[in-house]
Image: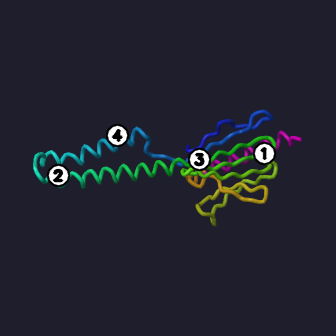
Amino acid sequence: MPYEWIRTEATDSEPAELHLWPYRSLPRKGFVIFIGVTSALIALPLFAALGTFVFWGLLPFLAAAVWGVWHALSRSYRQGELIEVLTIAAGRVDLRRREPNGKEQTWHANPYWIRVTLYPTGGRVPDYLTLKGEGREVEVGAFLTEGERKQLAGELRAAFAALQALGPTV
């Protein structure tokens, strides 16, 4: 799952914390192996041309192909550095979204007035998941799959219900 509860229940001393991030199908080690294998396979035709002018004619194009694959995968990794952190404490809920470029967006609300909404249709994505409170509605986990958003909605409702069962703090 591309999200993880660091602490699942909020108490007076410890808030619940949820981290969400986009799914990465290729880990860093796999990235290195893929670039190495791609480089080796692209270099095979060069062995037949070693010591000829054809070698120097092919080399820049094959190097550009390897660089293009490396650049595309690196860019994908940079865009995958997005993270959302939802902190649920007794008197306050904070949602921080840090973009890959370092820009950070925040949202705060009182946990006793938050409504978890899952829109089956009509949102940017199917099963659009939002939190509404303090006069704003914010999206959570747009990068998750439909099933993951449904599961997360249930977990968020349970977390807020457990917090409301504790009662408000003064």
Residue extending farthest top = 13
Tag 2's secondary structure? helix
Q: Which residue position is annotated with label 3?
A: 83
N-terminal label among 2 and 1: 2
At label 4, which amino acid type do we have? Ile
Q: Position of residue 95 (x, y in %)?
A: 69, 49
**Gap between marks 2 and 4, in whole Å?**
26 Å
N-terminal label among 1 and 4: 4
Q: Which residues are magenta?
A: 149-170
Tag 1's secondary structure? loop
Question: Image quadrant for the C terminus?
Answer: top right
**Gap between marks 1 and 3, in whole Å?**
20 Å
Q: Residue at x 79, y 48 (%)?
A: 111
Q: Which residue position is annotated with label 4?
A: 33
Tag 4's secondary structure? helix
Q: Nearer the viewer, residue 120 or 90?
A: 90
Q: Position of residue 52 (x, y in %)?
A: 10, 50
N-terminal label among 1 and 3: 3
Q: Position of residue 36 (x, y in %)?
A: 31, 41
Q: Is residue 61 magenta?
A: no
At label 1, which amino acid type do we have? Arg
Q: Name the quadrant containing residue 39.
A: top left
Task: Left or right? Give the position of 13 relative to 1.
Answer: right
Task: Left or right? Give the position of 68 relative to 53.
Answer: right
Tell me the tag on residue 56: 2
Q: Which residue position is annotated with label 1?
A: 92
